[in-house]
Image (cartoon, helix red, strand yellow):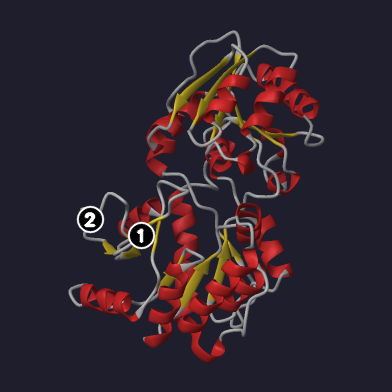
Amino acid sequence: MNLQAEFLERAGHVVTFVSPALRTGPVDDERFIDLPSFPIPTVREYTWIRPSQRHLAQVERALRVRPAVDVVHVQSDFWGAALGYRFGRGRDLPIVHTMHHRLDVGVNRSIPFPGILYALLGRWQKWSLGDDAVDRPRNAFDYLAGYAHHSDVVTAPSEHFARLLAKRDVVSRRHPDIAVIPTGVSDDVLERVAGLSRDPRNVTRVAWVGRFSPEKRLLEFLEGVAECPEPLDVVIVGDGGLASKAKALATPNVRFVGAVSYDRAIEVIADADILVQTSHDFETQGMTVTEALSMGTHVVLVDSAVADGLPKSSVTVAADLTSKALGDALARAVRTVDATNHQRDLGNATEFRQSHCTAQMITQYRRAIAR
């Protein structure tokens, strides 16, 4: 979202963020309206709020010294969505809602009694939408649809996720077609990478970037590496609860570099010959895939839905979820990379440039405003 804001500002627009304050306190950035928040004990980087009239009053006060709001863009599912819809509807402002998450997978796999959470979220939604809210959402898609029906435009970051949302009726009643707009990659990064050449190497370099959490399937990735018959130089970026298990399972050709900055992660992806994403039935876009393709790095996937619509020459898909199938996919990808002499394929850079994605989003803002 910071990247989206930067390119909206380059196009002459004004962006204001409303979000729970970080655990480290308010950020020193005048674009942010930081709301008092509580830590989430199980996820150290996240905070939460219980949306209330007090928060809306704080937003109203902060906006008095800023240009008038033309559109509310909701990019969250919980407290941010409740506040965004309450604020937008109270001012009769158009609402654009980007659906980012497989809420059904994330909640149902991580919370013992998900129905209790949906009931709580339903109460917040009732506060946000008033009499227009559904009585009680039974599942994630009921809940998301409750908001989507009252938006002016719904966007999604990929074709496959848009199809799932449409199938479950998570669409705007005003404009039922979902606009597919991926989260892009900085034009500046792409320009810099386009001028770089990879270091000469005898062994194919493979990168895995993400949280060390079960849905990302890091352990399964390491099992696949062990099954691959081709020599590999594996770099793993990230951290999380599975760190000790992953390091115990890793073969000697695997290096862990820990959690790094966005720019450093981009450098690792750009320098790799192959980027692997091992999550299945979870990603709505998979940012690392977009970034890799933009920078000419071949991609290995286990989720054929994510691969759908991506350039076939730049993607290898495992036949199934077994470690042997992933090892075979890695071997096929190595042969593909060897055939190109490890050169970048920058033919996909334009589609995912953030300037291009921002232009598409501005079109949707105008569409919403013209209601």
Question: Of label 1 and label 2, which has the lower sequence position?
Answer: 2
Q: Compared to 312, does 50 lie above or below?
A: below
Residue 36 picture location, percent across and down: 29, 64
Furthest residue in direction bottom, as rendered: 131
Looking at the image, which residue sits at the far left?
65
Front-lying residue, 275 or 60: 60
For label 1, the crowd category at 10 Å Cα-Cα, with few meaning under 14, some 14 to 19 and many 20 or more, is some
Foreground residue among 294 and 222:
222
Left or right: 272 in relation to 104: left
Q: What label sits on residue 316 in the rendered view?
A: none
- Disc 1 marks a residue whose amino acid type is Phe
Residue shown at the point (49%, 67%) measured from the top left: 78
**Depicted 76 relative to depicted 10: above or below:** below
Residue at the disc numbered 1: 38
Residue shown at the point (28%, 74%) measured from the top left: 59
Q: Is residue 233 left or right of residue 81?
A: right
Residue sitting at x 25%, y 53%: 25
Indicate whether 147 appears above or below 325: below
Q: Nearer the viewer, residue 194 or 107?
A: 107
**Where residue 3 sits in the image (x, y, percent)?**
39, 51
Amino acid type of disc 2? Asp
Secondary structure, mark 2, is: loop
Image coordinates of residue 358 in percent, x first then y, are 44, 58
Lateral position of residue 29 relative to residue 245, left or right: left
- Residue on which the image places disc 2: 29
Q: Is residue 158 left or right of residue 98?
A: right
Quadrant in the picture for residue 346: top right
